[in-house]
Amino acid sequence: MIGRMDEIRVLIVADDPLARAGLAALLAGQEGCTVVGQASGADDPDAALALYRPDAVVWDVGWDADELPQALAEWDAAAPPLVVLIPEAGLSAPLWAAGVRGLLPRSVEPEKLAAALQAVCAGLAVFDPALFDSLLEPGLSPSAARAPIDRLTPREMDVLALLAEGLANRAIAQRLGISEHTVKFHLNAILGKLGAQSRTEAVVLAIRLGLLTA
């Protein structure tokens, strides 16, 4: 939890020291963001988090991100939210599956990066619109993603919002004070109404349809 929503402690992670320095310089000019440390992707994540105690982490994957999902698996689920900067959209799906809360291109403007950090600290998922299609299940056409849907109930919207936070069924049940069986019932209803094949696809479609804020 952050002490003030308008002041976020940010840890920058990147293998390239020039990339780290560049991001630090960009965020230094953004109100509400304080860069508290820099680390390499090869550093011990627990040690870096304990040393800098950030509210959010910006991870620039550089141009070679093949091993990044495995590296992210070492980050504890209770760790601060991650905003990952990627060189191309094809990396979106495995990174989302690894638990990343924000996905943005490496060319993102400083203002958008700062806004994304505020959003993930508030519990929202953040995606650049250009990355949406890469998160859809194979075979789902853009027209299907824009197809009319049945109205979601207030409880289904509650479940959908928590899905966007990356919570598992048990955590959603605890947050809403309902049973896991009820969560599964609502989840099946959400997938059916959105025409989605997975939890990830449901969140992506909901963002595209304006049901969730990107």
Image (cartoon, helix red, strand yellow):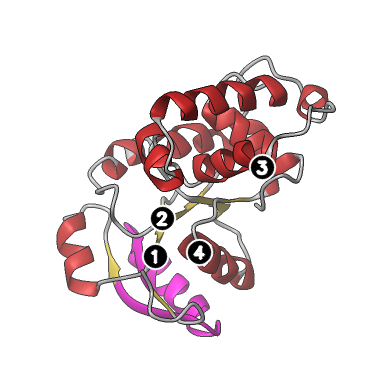
Question: For numbered disc 4, what is the local secondary structure?
Answer: loop
Q: Are marks 2 and 3 in contact (CB under 8 Å)?
A: no
Observer-nearest of 89 and 74: 74
Observer-nearest of 26 and 180: 180
Question: Label 1: few (<14), some or many (≥20) within 10 Å?
Answer: many
The residue to which callout 3 is attached is: 154
Residue type at tag 2: Leu
Residue type at tag 3: Pro
Q: Is residue 195 left or right of residue 30?
A: right
Residue type at tag 1: Ala
Q: Is residue 18 left or right of residue 138?
A: left
- Mark 3 or mark 1, which is nearer to you? 3
Question: For numbered disc 2, what is the local secondary structure?
Answer: strand
The residue to which callout 1 is attached is: 56
The residue to which callout 4 is attached is: 122
Residue type at tag 4: Ala
The residue to which callout 2 is attached is: 82
- Mark 1 or mark 4, which is nearer to you? 4
Quadrant position of residue 20: bottom left
Q: Earlier in the sequence, mark 1 or mark 4?
A: 1
